[in-house]
Image (cartoon, rainbow, N blue to C red):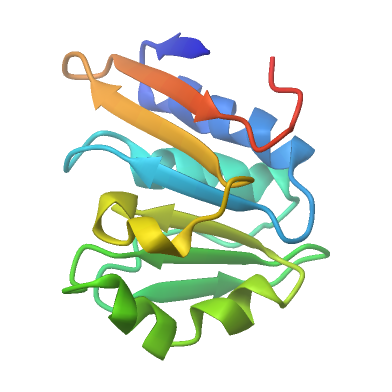
Amino acid sequence: MKIFTDNEQETVYEGKKLGRKLMPGSVVALFGDLGAGKTAFTRGVAEGLGIKAIVSSPTFTIVNEYPGDVPLFHFDMYRLENEDELFDIGWDDYRDRDGVCVVEWSEKVPGAFTSDTIIIRIEKLGDDKREILIENSGGLEIC
């Protein structure tokens, strides 16, 4: 499924629509170049989950945790050398905590994902335009 957005607010909105459908234990793997809109999309997921916190990129901390009825665990794999480092920081524990895991720079940790992972690729088409490609919906009805 392809979605096109014309500005950051629309990218956030598409994330919000997805966030409303996510269940505890859901994993969303985001792919896209620097500046593609992965963090904006994640802000929307947080809104859709009812999280009021300001979502920022966890580039230097690897993971930011946002409490809520369904907590959000926002990962950024940019600084990791390999997926072993992700497992060393407790990836399996996060997956077992009944929250939603959203992972930026997922291409760095392909072995961390199972067949029910929601795969989303975001491509920058211009200054503000984005193409959001949902390759695997993880079994969710996404429209």
Q: Name which residue lies at 42% across and 88% down.
A: 89
Which one is nearer the viewer's eye here, 84 or 80? 84
Q: Position of residue 132 (x, y in %)?
A: 41, 21
Q: Say which quadrant the C terminus sits in.
A: top right
Q: In this view of the protein, which residue sits in the foreground, 143 or 116?
A: 116
Name the residue nearer the viewer: 101 or 109.
109
Give coordinates of residue 115: x percent, y percent. 58, 46
- As drawn, is 99 to the left or to the right of 112? right
Q: Quadrant of residue 108?
A: bottom left
Q: Tell me if 14 is positioned left or right of 141 in this view.
A: left
Above or below, 4 relative to 85: above
Residue 118, quarter of picture: top right
61, above or below 131, in the image: below
Work out whether 2 lies above or below 27. above
Residue 85 position within the rendered picture, expressed as x and y whole percent measured from the top left: 30, 82
Q: Going 45% across and 33% down the picture, which residue do you hit?
A: 120
120 with respect to 37 (left or right): right
Q: Is residue 120 above or below residue 100?
A: above
At a point 59% along the width and 62% down the height, the residue shown is 53
Q: Position of residue 61 (x, y in %)?
A: 32, 80
**Would residue 143 be found to the left or right of residue 15 on screen?**
right
Q: Residue furthest right?
A: 69
